[in-house]
Amino acid sequence: MACRAAGEELPRPCCNGYSELAPADMRRALVQERPEKHSREEAAEGGELPALEDAYLSILEGLGENPARQGLLQTPRRAAKAMQFLTKGYQETIEDILNDAIFDEDHNEMVIVKDIDMFSLCEHHLVPFFGKVHIGYLPIKKVVGLSKLARIVEIFSRRLQVQERLTRQIALAITEALKPAGVAVIVEASKGQGDTKYQE
Amino acid sequence: MEKGKLGALLEQPPRSVSCNGYALEEKQPPPPPPAAPSRALERPRYSQGTSARCLDGWKEERTRSEEDNEMNLPSLAAAYTTILRSLGEDPERQGLLRTPWRAATAMQFFTKGYQETISDVLNDAIFDEDHDEMVIVKDIDMFSLCEHHLVPFVGKVHIGYLPNKQVLGLSKLARIVEIYSRRLQVQERLTKQIAVAITEALQPTGVGVVIEATHMCMVMRGVQKMNSKTVTSTMLGVFREDAKTREEFLTLIRS
């Protein structure tokens, strides 16, 4: 069955970006889906900036523009830094932000945080998509600081993403951290061209 | 006579003094207009941008062809592969395998305005009409790329003009917006290019262009202000001189 996302024939059910992982690894990989952290930190410290700048310079030339004109002189550097910012989620982990904000509360009614602004990058075209995330969960004895839900959204959205995976990663992260009775995540997003995609 | 007046008005300094890629040319004395190129409509009414100082974006010359696109695609894709690797991602994983090609094709689409010229789009859609009331086409969706960060900015364009014996097919106004917005742009320059293109093509009594846009470079990064909009306008001819005409235009696009 052909995978629409990757555009290739695949001998397995339609992929969603993480079905290539063995089930045992899936939970771990979904929450912390990146290679060794130190290579990400290297990228964060600007070690990769020259390579990014060169890449953007060749993109400008390949598009037929004149990179020496005034408006574009610093563009490779600005675009490289912007791209690093837009993918800064790779440098962050859930433990960093959650470790001290889980509280024991005897509350077993639904908690909802809605209209969390979300900005992400489509991994297929490197085009931004943005929208809102709505999160609800039913706690069992443990609640999480509310802004931490927005931070979880930030960590996973500031990456190269597919909306389906983003939704699932947020839900799984909350499940792992709190072990609630249930979690629901809805992401509604668009690429600004007049269409909206809803993902639950 | 009207044409000369309009031409003189176009040579005035722009209302905004911030340098936006073509302010340099105004400090020099206007060079003589170039020899008319083969396009029938090319009657430059302004003296900026007629030399090799500013090769792209400002002039209407076609800087790219379909063959160029095909030739450049591999190097663009290689650049995107480098970007993916430098960001710490794994370009070999399934979701990213063809991303460099897709991103390169997408970027070529977002800059397809470099392949098109106004004369391609307009040659046969100018009609003689004895209409001298304002014509407005508003809420034209616009998608462009910020040339500073290569991040999109999206918004709406409102165009009004006072015809002088010649009117333009209405969808051609939207096509003019497309040609100039599908480039690496600065919103100020985009506004002016649209206004000047209409002026060149129709020689109307006046043209007004207003663009309001949201810049992703401000929303997704940097100051991260979600709800801010940037509004730029260019008023030429009677739209600049006559406050009442301008007022009528601005009122009508607001309603």
Image (tube, rainbow, N blue to C red):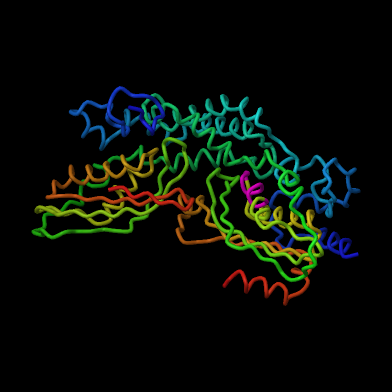
Q: Where is residue A161 in the image (x, y as percent from the top left)?
A: 37, 39
- Left or right of B90? Residue B80 is right
Q: Is residue B50 magenta?
A: no
Asked where in the image residue B94 lies, by quadrant, the reply is top left
Q: Quadrant of residue B191 in the image? A: bottom right
* Residue lying at the far top of the rendered structure: A11
Q: In which quarter of the image is the C terminus of chain B?
A: bottom right
Q: Residue at x 43, y 46 (%)?
A: A129
Magenta stretch mostly in which secondary structure? Answer: helix
Q: Where is residue A142 in the image (x, y as percent from the top left)?
A: 13, 52
Tally the marks.
0
Q: Residue at x 23, y 47 (%)?
A: A98
Q: Nearer the viewer, residue B169 or A61?
A: B169
Q: Which stretch appears magenta?
A: B176-184
User: Residue A12, how many percent across, how many down?
Assistant: 28, 25
Q: In this view, does A150 lie above or below B82?
A: below
Horizontal and vertical percent position of residue B52: 80, 39
Q: In which quarter of the image is residue B167?
A: bottom right
Quadrant, the N terminus of chain B = bottom right
Would residue B254 be found to the left or right of residue B170 on screen? left
Query: Going by the image, does A97 lie left or right of A48?
Result: left
